[in-house]
Amino acid sequence: MRIITTIKEMQHEAKTMIREGKTIGFVPTMGYLHEGHMSLVQKAREKNDCVIMSVFVNPLQFGPDEDFDRYPRDLKRDELLARKAGVDVLFYPHVDEMYPKELTTMLTVNKRVDTLCGESRPGHFDGVATVVMKLFQIVLPDKAYFGMKDAQQVAVIKGLVDDYNLPVEIIPCPIIREEDGLAKSSRNVYLTPSEREESTLLSQSLNAARKVIRDGERDPGLIIELVQSYLKQTSGTIDYVEVLSYPELQPVNRINEEVIIAVAVQFSAARLIDNTMALRSEKAIGV
Ligand code: AMP
């Protein structure tokens, strides 16, 4: 596995791969890798000749009061895990390499961001869209792999790719969970032992919601109440519980087609998000 830290070298390497007729699968991450990230690598390996993973904690997508400085970082560990998973190139640029000067152009996401994390993290998805656009120009991937753990991110990136006719296929991948149901996340290390126990209520609430929808419930209001009844048992603060169309992320009056049920709970030092799809795309997305 090669580790590349400069844009010039990364672009050169990607162009060489393309010239050699190889396809590139790309897995963008912020590092502190876990099985969720690894599942994306595995999918990328199945369908591409080369796998490029980026590890970059992108300051543009963190608000002033968010955890950019204390976001967990451990390159040595990431390096080992990436190598073991079969990554060919680990792209690990410094912030000054990605943003040597103030950007002349910044992307603004207009749709799919007035709800969920977009509502509670203003500007977050502008930062995500901007860095993903930049990374795509550097890595030149055929396919890019994103986890449905961040379902709103997938919706936003799909919009970006459609809007600008980017020649990359976005592959959404299912959420990888701990045995007790907690969605794997780099931020889980910030949960206290008691919060860690309570955190299983997120996935339990979503499973309960899926079950009642499967059994015929069609009222989103009742689903939201059901999910809230679980989350209220935690010591955290509920940030949101929503039932929305996907990927448009619009409120629905009745659950007649595929919907996403998405939650966010703020614990003392970690904000957890989770979601599930109900009805049609349950099968399509494999969750
Ligand atoms: P992050 O490093 O948190 O920015 O995540 C990098 C990529 O891994 C994103 O596409 C995430 O959606 C994905 N990811 C993170 N956690 C999981 C998980 N538990 N299951 C599947 N994908 C995940």
Image (cartoon, rainbow, N blue to C red):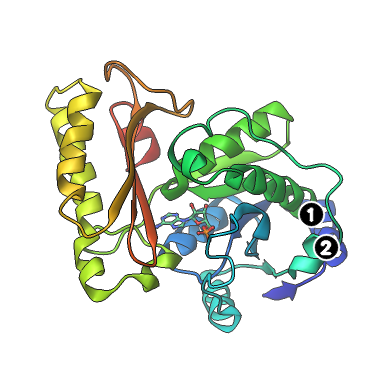
Residue at point 14% right, 31% down? 212
Q: Residue furthest front?
A: 65
Element type where label 2 sits in the image = helix
Q: Position of residue 248 (x, y in %)?
A: 48, 25
Q: Is residue 115 left or right of residue 169?
A: left
Residue at point 14% right, 22% down? 216
Q: Position of residue 96 (x, y in %)?
A: 80, 67
Q: Position of residue 28 (x, y in %)?
A: 61, 57
The answer to whether 222 is drawn above or below residue 180 in the figure is above
Q: Which residue is mark 2?
A: 7
Q: Is residue 26 left or right of residue 230?
A: right
Residue at point 46% right, 47% down? 150
Q: Which residue is mark 1?
A: 138
Task: Please tell me which residue lies in front, 47 or 145.
Answer: 145
Q: Is residue 91 left or right of residue 224?
A: right
> Amino acid under label 2?
Ile
Specify whether residue 159 is in view: yes
Q: Is residue 238 left or right of residue 57?
A: left
Residue at point 43% right, 28% down? 246
User: Is the residue under label 1 in contact with that under label 2 (CB below 8 Å)?
Assistant: yes
Element type where label 1 sits in the image = helix
> Amino acid under label 1?
Ile
Specify whether residue 50 is in view: no
Give how far apart the Cα atoms at labels 2 and 1 are. Answer: 6 Å
Task: Please tell me which residue lies in front, 238 or 141.
Answer: 238
**Pointer 2 or 1: first along the chain:** 2
